[in-house]
Image (cartoon, coloured by chain):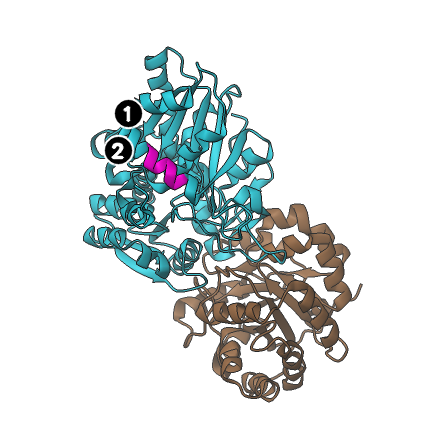
Amino acid sequence: MKYTVNEKGYYGKFGGAYIPEMLYPNVEELRTRYLDIIYEEGFQKEFHKLLRDYVGRPTPLYLAKRLSEKYGATIYLKREDLCHTGAHKVNNTIGQILLAKRLGKQKIIAETGAGQHGVATATVCALMGMECIVYMGKIDMERQRPNVERMRILGTTVVPALSGSMTLKDATNEAMRHWINNPTDTHYIIGSVVGPHPYPDMVARFQSVISEEMKKQLQEEIGNPYPDYVFACVGGGSNAAGAFYHFLDDEHVTLVASEAAGKGVDSGESAATTALGKPGVLHGSKTILMQTEDGQVVEPYSISAGLDYPGIGPIHAHLFDVGRVKFVSATDDEAMNAGLELSRMEGIIPAIESAHALAALSQFTFEKDDVVVVNLSGRGDKDLETYIRWGKY
Amino acid sequence: MKNRIKDLFASGKGNILSVYYTAGFPTFDSTAAIATALEKGGADIIEIGIPYSDPVADGPTIQESNKIALENGVTLPKILEQVKLIRKTVKIPIILMGYVNPVMQYGIERFAKDAAAAGVDGVILPDLPMDAFLAEYKTTFEAANLSNTFLISPTTSEDRIRKIDNETDGFIYAVSASSITGAKGEFADTQLQYFDRLKTMKLKNPFLIGFGISDHATFAKASSYGAGAIVGSAFINVLKKSANVASDSEAFAVSLKNNSKS
């Protein structure tokens, strides 16, 4: 696996564990134990049983006939939107809660932006009877009220992050501060392929079930496990990491990551990290992030709260750097139109995050026999307010 | 080469008071006035904070000072200019403390060269891990005669403390509790046991205790275990309310040192 993490926790020049010493013992415990725990037989059995019976995996690989006709290719949708809680996020939280139990932790903390990871974490904490605190930017709490209430119904304490810009990056800072203050009894469930090593690798492994299933399903559908293209949206990049994972070494598969361009890459209101960012350190790893010349982190913008993040996971920074993944971007307009198009053509209302992956389709010219998989990472229920405000339907 | 930090510790002086404050807080121009006043009040080291948008190891007090300093227009190049100005009069060691990203963006070699030229003696970058320091920073910092300080905390293993001690040439920053920065009350017994443990380890480098130092009592207590102590949030709180940062800074240093033998 030439694109996976090396022994030192780096993907090429990105990754590592840029953390204050106060977090070192926690992260070191994870680093030395995560692989043994995850690949232990009992863990795998419990993990896969929960993915099947609780999450509803495998998620279907659905041939989108009308979409295929429109774009002149065979387009499949990987239906992560059908996962319990409405998005792929739960694949990771199931894995991490099982890990936390085996590490002997009693409490869980998490950060959330749009609230999907918060809900997925609150869900598994309810399932396992563990105490849970989720940090969420005050502004995001106002924007995503239904998800705040979902977490509360599930028994989680939602704490508003009041520092900085009061959004996802600040919620992440607050969760890290909480972990510094509570190093022994608490596990921090990071929601994306970000953070200090081993988080990016660990989260990618839990999400890799997505591409593992794609391969099996394609084999059954078309007699060949390899598509010509895989499309996924990237905020931090956990659904993309999962959708790309088992195709990384198969260079004939074109991997496309779609970032949120917001109101346009050069509009000053964007979250297109690879287009606007530079290498630096964010949330414990060296990666590409949006920042000022002086190295201050810039607040991004996207209509999609889940893509509204100033960095990308170090694995994506590396895949971008070496050219293995093609990075494109879609504006708010393009994503909303693509979301409405899928609703009308296939009867599926996608999450606005996932709509950014769909919007990238029109930027490619396909051959008629091309097989394309779009990772439909989440469903649009949580985005109804945004769709309603957008109108045009 | 002479380095003011190494000279200070080589002198065998105890009760060393190191004071942290954020550059450009409360106003852009207060950086220099505060430095001069702290030296006058008896501070032995000044730690000037490079403000950062995402200070994960800091509590609300220092977070706020970072935010205000950035709003005041402080940047790393401007801080280096301020240090140059401070160096015209101030003789005590000056340390720059901050998060690694602004230093990375400035350029490691350029930073080391310019910081040393401005009169900086040492650097503390809490989120720079030891492996990255050894691979990418150590040689450059040493060539510029900049001393690097690592943090240790109550959860740092003895092995790791020894390793950090080996890679240090100056002093070790002993964080007093498993926590972010912030002024607290008295030390708990577990903290005192940890200080004791450090004392009996007979490290080759002296250590200064930081986090939770807020007044003369906590300063004196911490200094009885290590070479001295570092105060940050408590001083930022004084600056926040101050109508005259120069006289208040001097008085603060005096009050911390008061009654302690120096």
| Label 2: chain letter | A
Which quarter of the picture shows residue B41? bottom right
Reply above or below: B38 against B134: below
Comparing A65 with A198, the one in front is A65
Q: Residues within 10 Å of mark 2 (few under 14, many from 20)?
A: many
Q: Amino acid at mark 2?
A: Leu
The shade of chain B is brown
Residue A258 x/y as whole percent? 47, 36
Instruction: For residue B210, say whether it is visible.
Output: no
Tell which chain the image draws in cyan. Answer: A
Name the spot of residue B27 as percent of width and height, x first. Answer: 59, 77
Q: Secondary structure at mark 2?
A: helix
The answer to whether residue A337 is magenta is yes
Q: Main secondary structure of the magenta part?
A: helix
Residue named by callout 1: A60
Q: Which mark is residue A347?
A: none
* Same chain? Circles 1 and 2: yes
In the depicted structure, whether residue A294 falls above or below residue A16: below
Q: CA distance from mark 1 to mark 2?
A: 8 Å
The magenta region covers: A335-341
Placement of the N terminus of chain B among the 4 image quadrants: bottom right
Whether label 1 touches label 2, CB < 8 Å? yes
The image position of residue A254, as x and y in percent, is 50, 24
Give the residue type that dot 1 points to: Pro
| Quadrant location of the C terminus of chain B in the rendered image | bottom right
Classify residue A177 as left or right of residue B50. left
Q: Secondary structure at mark 1?
A: loop
Name the residue beneath numbered marker 2: A82
State the image coordinates of residue B144 (x, y, percent, origin top left). 76, 58
Q: Is residue A160 left or right of residue B69?
A: left
Q: Is residue B69 visible?
A: yes
Task: Output the chain of dot 1.
Answer: A
